[in-house]
Amino acid sequence: MKVNRLKISCPRCSNSGTIAKDGCYYRKNDSRKIQRFLCRHCGKKFSKSTFKLEYRQKKRRVNGDLFRLLASGVSMRRCALILNIHRTTVERKFVYLAEKARMVQRKILHDLRDNPIEHMQFDDLITIEHTKLKPLSVSAAVDAKKRLILGAEVSQIPAFGHLAKLSRKRNLPLLKNMKMSFNIFKYLLFFWHVHLNTIFCYIASADGEK
């Protein structure tokens, strides 16, 4: 076994000076040969894929196609039908693609530290969640020259237009329950305060009798 000169540390003991190559294996799901490594300090065996976000994925071949379909506005159920996979797999891949997009976004923002942006544009999108009574606002900041998305934030907004009165009417029972719960909480707090004062008075009287 040859000592590895790459800057790879052991995932168990975090030692980088005793890492050696330990052959390779054939990965079936994407038809690639993956290099294995051995830590001579603790005996841990690992590979290059151990440190990647796709670690232990069984269907790496569909990642690229699924990303393009989702970015094109195709629904998750339709993606599962096109790619011949289960919709639960699409849901898990969606979480993975979201985390990978965050990693790419952080790298882009880190690279922009040396070249600060001079012109920035803001845009706002109004959409809904389940129903028009629950509108959402999606705000985005974009580089005016390169069209890079610098950041996005989703926030809840009250219903507007002719649905505003209906939205308040539907949320009225929830507000009443919140008010009732708050009154019960105030009563319990008052009861606990009186009960605690009674205990202190009893302890004080007991000490006085001694």
Image (tube, grey):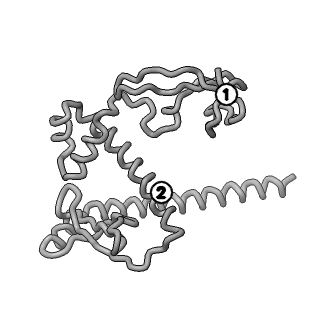
Numbered tag placed on residue 107 in the rendering:
2
Q: Which mark is residue 14?
A: none
Query: What residue would you read off at disc 1?
Result: 3
Residue 44 % position (x, y): 63, 24
Tell me the residue at 36%/61% (across/down). Answer: 178
Where residue 76 appears, as percent x and y from the top left, is 21, 43
Classify mark 1: residues with Cα within 10 Å, few (<14), some (14-19) or many (20+): some
The image quadrant where one finds the N terminus is: top right
Horizontally, residue 89 falls left or right of residue 26, namely: left
- Mark 2 is surrounded, within 10 Å at the Cα level, by few (under 14), some (14 to 19) or many (20 or more) other residues, namely few
What is the three-letter code of the residue carrying label 1?
A: Val
| Residue 84 point in image, percent of width and height | 19, 30
Work out how far the residue at label 1 is from the one at label 2, CA to CA, in angstroms: 31 Å
Image point (54%, 62%), residue name: 190
Mark 1 or mark 2, earlier in chain: 1
| Nearer to the camera, 46 or 161 | 46
Asked where in the image residue 22 lies, by quadrant, the reply is top right
Element under label 2? helix
Q: Which residue is at the front of the view, 148 or 75?
A: 148
Is 23 positioned to the left or the right of 182 in the image? right
